Image: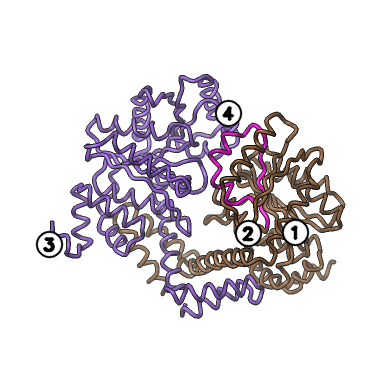
Chain colours: A brown, B purple
Amino acid sequence: MGVASAMPETAEHWAEKIRAGDVRAIARAITAVENQNALADDLLKQLFPATGAAYLIGCTGAPGTGKSTLVDRLAARYRTAEHSVGIIAVDPTSPFTGGAILGDRIRMQGHAGDSAIFIRSVATRGFLGGLARGTADIALVLDAAGKHYILVETVGVGQDEVDIVRLADCTIVVLVPGMGDDIQSMKAGLMEIADIFVVNKSDREGADRLEQQVQAMLELAPERNGWKPRVIRTVATEDRGVLELTQAIADFRKHSDGSPARAAKKVEYWKRRLVERLEQQLLHRAIPGREGARRLDACAIEVAERRKDPFTAVQDLLRDAGL
Amino acid sequence: MGVASAMPETAEHWAEKIRAGDVRAIARAITAVENQNALADDLLKQLFPATGAAYLIGCTGAPGTGKSTLVDRLAARYRTAEHSVGIIAVDPTSPFTGGAILGDRIRMQGHAGDSAIFIRSVATRGFLGGLARGTADIALVLDAAGKHYILVETVGVGQDEVDIVRLADCTIVVLVPGMGDDIQSMKAGLMEIADIFVVNKSDREGADRLEQQVQAMLELAPERNGWKPRVIRTVATEDRGVLELTQAIADFRKHSDGSPARAAKKVEYWKRRLVERLEQQLLHRAIPGREGARRLDACAIEVAERRKDPFTAVQDLLRDAGL
């Protein structure tokens, strides 16, 4: 270790270790991606050709639906079948509460000693909606590391969460009995993203009614690419229904893999990512370093005080950056 | 009308009519801004120096909290005091339901014949989170038209809504009894944005407890710039508590107007807007017209099929655009 670790590591070497499944190299890569470390892009570029094989499952639902337990049980099922698993828990509220980080540690204990399972919480939201991008890049790292399944867990169905779920191959929406009103208000958003509905805590009163409501919603909704979303009842804490859920996921995978709709979704996804990255790069050119930040501040003050209009301000910034 | 309306209108002339409060000119301007019409930027540039005098009140809350009624009553109060009012109702879910547009018409009837009140619903979400930007530009139009108060009504506290609320001078969060669980999960987000809490439908059971919960939250939260958010009880349908709400808004306005924190918030807001606009302009240069869109599509396909990595793809796009 001593001498070698003092040497600067190349992206190539680092990527090699990740592809070999080295847990520490993976963990460092995720931290680098989250912090937008200077080497992160180089690393992702090295890793990219090795990606595309993992199956990414998005799991979303309101707080208190038992998503985390469900994701843990799902991961355990896949591990039993000798598949390697990565879990990304996205919790945009955790900067306030620290909840995700703590939960992370507690959860890791359950899978302690199993190097084929990797759990990471994401909680940072960048200046420009970086939550979805960060999560996608972490998924790329886990994909390159050879994880068979990547489970991404998000809270709610806000725009950030929908963006994250858009990158998933299969999307699970978790509901629990006693949320009737929320379903009404979330209906449109949910119907658009769910490939599978899970009624968790289905031993509770109201589970039948909830399942009926979801089925009624599905009757009204147009079929998407020949798939009618399944409704699976689970009691995640007792591992009930989890096997059925893996079966529903397998069915959906069989249905969609290689389909034109799936290919089109992937192209659409990458189009968005390329646009994001283009914007980011161009912005760095337009607002270069400290000097650029200083010019931006000065312009914002002039505009706020109505001494300059925002259109002229943007033209001035572009001209000053030689663009 | 005949001959004059066939002539192309200049942005200068259009802006003049808006500043004079011409309702049709205002309505056309808002449509132009929403559709990102070619003349919209020119028009906004003309209008900009005439903006900055309106007081912008953001009002947010979950569906079913009675926000719209509250905003209507608030508008009526301001009208009684001879102030002119603009209302922007933002409903990102309405493309699915058409609800906003219908509600719009119903609401307009209540203020029919009052040309000093202007109501407009915004429902389109652009490719790149254009909801907040569109709303801000509509607010500029109403500001230039001399509206004293602009009321912006949004659903929920997702990122889009928070961005919209960030542009407000004063932010009202509307709660109703019987939402206890939601408050817990939304706590952090709410505390961050609310200058005033409204407990609406306060004649319902649970109003006391809700008010206590909010007060307890406020006890724990750090004071922001010397202001402790107020909690106002209303029954909007009966116009109860609305006068008290206008008083709380006036108090907050007195507290924050001219304060360094307020000035800093405005500069921060314009910084974000300038960055957005820079990105948009640069993106148009990087992906020019149909040819640019075709190149982007081709790159996205190559990346989705792992024939090219996204980093190289972005470099290629920049090079092809001569950037």
Say left or right for A85 vs A89: right
Amino acid type of the residue tagged 4 in the rendering: Gly
Amino acid type of the residue tagged 3 in the rendering: Val
- Figure quadrant of the N terminus of chain A: bottom right
Q: Is residue B203 magenta?
A: no
Which image quarter: residue B36?
bottom left
Which image quarter: residue A210?
top right
The residue beneath circle 1 is A27
A308 or B72: nearer the viewer: B72
Q: Residues within 10 Å of mark 2 (few under 14, many from 20)?
A: many
Say left or right for A78 vs A227: right
Q: Position of residue A78 (x, y in %)?
A: 82, 53
The residue beneath circle 4 is B180
Q: Residues within 10 Å of mark 4 (few under 14, many from 20)?
A: some
**Residues at marks 3 and 4 on the same chain:** yes
Say left or right for A317 vs A212: left
Q: Secondary structure at mark 1?
A: helix
The residue beneath circle 3 is B3
Could you tell me which residue is drawn at 66 percent across and 40 percent down? A175
Q: Position of residue A62 (x, y in %)?
A: 63, 40
Label 2–label 3 contact, CB within 8 A = no
The residue beneath circle 2 is A167
Front disc: 1 or 3: 3
Above-or-below relation of B295 to B158: below
